[in-house]
Image (cartoon, rainbow, N blue to C red):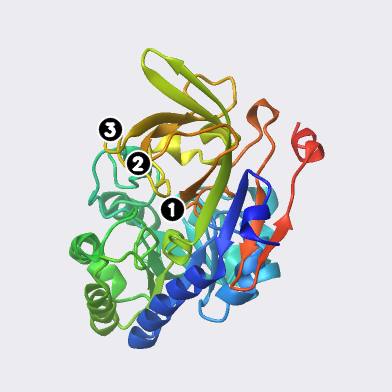
Amino acid sequence: MKFEELKTPCYVIEEEKLKKNLEILRYVMEETGCHILLAQKAFSMYYSYPLLGTVLSGTTASGLYEAKLGAEEMGRENHVFSAAYRQDEFEEIAELCDHIVFNSIGQLKQFEGIAKEKGKSIGIRINPECSTQEGHAIYDPCAPGSRLGITLSQLKTAEETYGANLLEQVEGLHFHTLCEQNADDLKKTLDAVEEKFGSYLKNMKWLNMGGGHHITRKDYDVKLLINCIRHMQETYGVEVYLEPGEAVALNAGLLVTTVLDITENGGIKNAILDTSAACHMPDVLEMPYRPPLRDSGEPGERAYTYRLGGPTCLAGDVIGDYSLNQELTIGDRLIFEDMAIYSMVKNNTFNGMKLPDIVWKSEEACQVIKSFGYEDFKMRL
């Protein structure tokens, strides 16, 4: 099938761009010997897993279903972190995963016996209390009052309660503090980790630096990342793990949509599309985030400015304001870029909206991997 023949809305994953990202990640792995895992919370299109598995060390999960997906579809290293595990799911998680990371001392004490009995490597998530981002605390695990990770003071208090051998079964430390950030913020975070948890790292086998590393972005400082990894390896003798999600599929996906109607109110032209911010790109409303639109500019930058929005009843179902060189007409197609990440994994059927098709684009052609219909809406209710 040709690209122009695709029905909209649809997510289109571009094989060649995934491969370019993988080559950068491969370079980091070869230069350092670190393990890079796919964070499935950002990108779980398992059709791509055979390709990703030729380079990546495996997958990381946030719970049982992602753990099952990683085990079934990639079948390499399988790691898991959850803010809290369910008693009725933990046995199965412990069967599926190689590394199991706990978020609290309470959960560690509750489940470490099961994990150790099954021969799994146990980790604990730490909170270095080092915020390196501004403007969106929803994505900042080091924000005041965060429920994610154990602070140094909490760890010290727990040792007073349980004894100095509290972490006897723990083989690794895990932190995740970044979101779409460069290696300078990782360096700053590592300084805080060493200052607060360096004495614990000396007794560990591995360190997981989490995700949020925008490794495949054009301006990313790969050299500094490599230096950071090597420093931790050489100083503490640990194996280093990274678990990026966005970096794996960054700029490798499109969301293709069609203009259904054009209205005007208060001097603003609204183009109503067959895709929805609320349903198909929720980060637009949560972040907030303005997805790049191909061949467009900022409002007023080009001749014609439109407010692009979805067809749902939500008044705030607005993608953003964009300017174009030509007037839009009903039936025109628009292409949003960088739509592989946090789209398929977060979309929903609010208002009974149809989920977009999922398409794989290779050099040869486009292949529709999955289509959705009424039953996909009904079965969720």
Q: CA distance from mark 3 to mark 2?
A: 40 Å
Residue type at the position of mark 2: Ser
Q: Position of residue 185 (x, y in %)?
A: 22, 59
Q: Are marks 1 and 2 in contact (CB under 8 Å)?
A: no
Out of 41 and 110, give the one closest to the viewer.
41
In the displayed image of the protein, which residue is found farthest to the top? Answer: 266
**C-alpha gap between disc 1 and disc 2:** 15 Å
In the rendered image of this protein, does residue 265 appear above or below residue 244?
above
Please tell me which residue lies in front, 223 or 231.
223
Q: Where, quadrant-wise, is the C terminus in this rendering?
A: top right
The residue that mark 3 highlights is 300
Q: Are marks 3 and 2 in contact (CB under 8 Å)?
A: no
Residue 181 placement (x, y as % from top left): 29, 57
Q: In this view of the protein, can residue 257 be seen by the observer?
A: yes
Q: Does residue 371 appear to the left or right of 257 in the view shown?
A: right
Which of labels 1 and 2 is toward the front?
2
Q: Is residue 150 left or right of residue 9?
A: left
Q: Earlier in the sequence, mark 3 or mark 1?
A: 1
Q: In the rendered view, would you say 184 is above or below 290?
A: below
Q: Nearer the viewer, mark 3 or mark 2?
A: 3
Element under label 3? loop
Q: Which residue was labeled with disc 1?
A: 105
Query: What residue is shown with label 2?
Result: 146
What amino acid type should be assigned to the residue bearing mark 3? Gly
Question: Which marked residue is nearer to the observer: mark 3 or mark 1?
Answer: 3
Residue 205 visible here: no
In the rendered view, does 323 fall on the left or right side of 343? Answer: left
Going by the picture, which residue comes out furthest to the front? Answer: 326
Q: Residue 226: horizontal and vertical position, in percent?
A: 27, 78
**For the residue labelled by badge 1, is the local secondary structure a helix, a strand or a loop?**
helix
Label at residue 91: none
